[in-house]
Image (cartoon, rainbow, N blue to C red):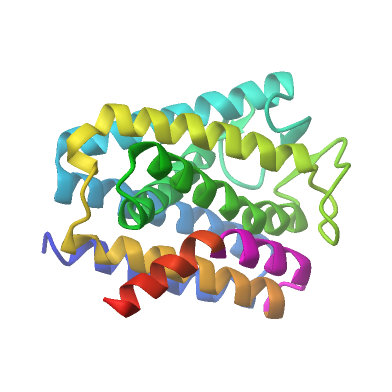
Amino acid sequence: MRHRLPWILLAVLVLCQICYPLTGGDVRAGLTVATVLLGYLLSVSHALLTRGTRAALALVGTATLGGFAVEALGVATSFPFGTYDYSGRLGPKLLGVPLIIPLAWTWMAWPAWLAAVRLTRRPWLRIVTAAVGLAAWDLFLDPQMVAEGYWRWQSPTPALPGVPGIPIGNYLGWLGFALVLMTALAVLGQRAIERPLRSDAPIITLWFWTYASSVLAHAVFLGLPASALWGGIVMGAVVIPLAARRRFR
């Protein structure tokens, strides 16, 4: 059961994401919350089961607590993501931040880190690669969530061509915090998270699935072709080399 749990969580998560574009309204919002909860459980439980308590605590401390802190700072001061606010459709809030938001940071921080571990052995380059991968995911996330009305910016310019509603400064803020997050994760996790393991397969599968499904959903089902292109290019810079390396091996 210990080895099956990540695969079970991943399977249910994928099912929720497949249902997402087929629904709307409160059902879609509920699926969004469920997907984040499943992703959080998947990443944290995998870190705990494969690398121990230190790795799991490092992930929670940097991505969950750190993610909440930076979001609370952002809502209160407009730094580092710009002036934005959340709707009430994603569940309860604390300090203006829906409680599932830091869980989403954690959900995708772990696969971004494990992907980077496989791409480079240099510590500094691993941190940069993981940060770019995590920040690139936001090129899918924010356009999708803004289109659903889950949050909005008061001054959404300048924006990327074809992706209105999100200022470019938000993506830079994501990259800046992702660099801080991954640096802290590397320091706190140390040797426990420095090596790839065969048991990482569910998380690497999640990484590939997130990329491929996001490109497909945005381009075909959600009517967001520009974000499919931007996310496909930038996140692809981290995903595609890993896929090519695994195929070669």
Vertical side of 6 occupied by 158: above or below: above
Residue found at x 21% / y 49%: 195
Across the whole image, how many numbered discs are drawn on residues?
Answer: 0
Q: Is residue 31 visible?
A: no
Q: Which residues are magenta?
A: 221-236
Most frequent secondary structure within the magenta stretch? helix
Between 165 and 180, the one lying in front of the other is 180
Residue in the image at 28% along x and 65% along y? 202
In this rendering, position of residue 69 left or right of residue 116: right
Nearer to me, 39 or 66: 66
Above or below residue 212? Residue 42 is: above
Q: Is residue 59 above or below residue 148?
A: above
Residue depicted at x 47% and y 53%:
36
- Residue 61, horizontal then vertical, whole percent: 35, 28
Name the spot of residue 81 as percent of width and height, x first: 70, 33
Residue 3 visible in the current orientation: yes
Membership of 225 in magenta stretch: yes
Q: Residue furthest front?
A: 122
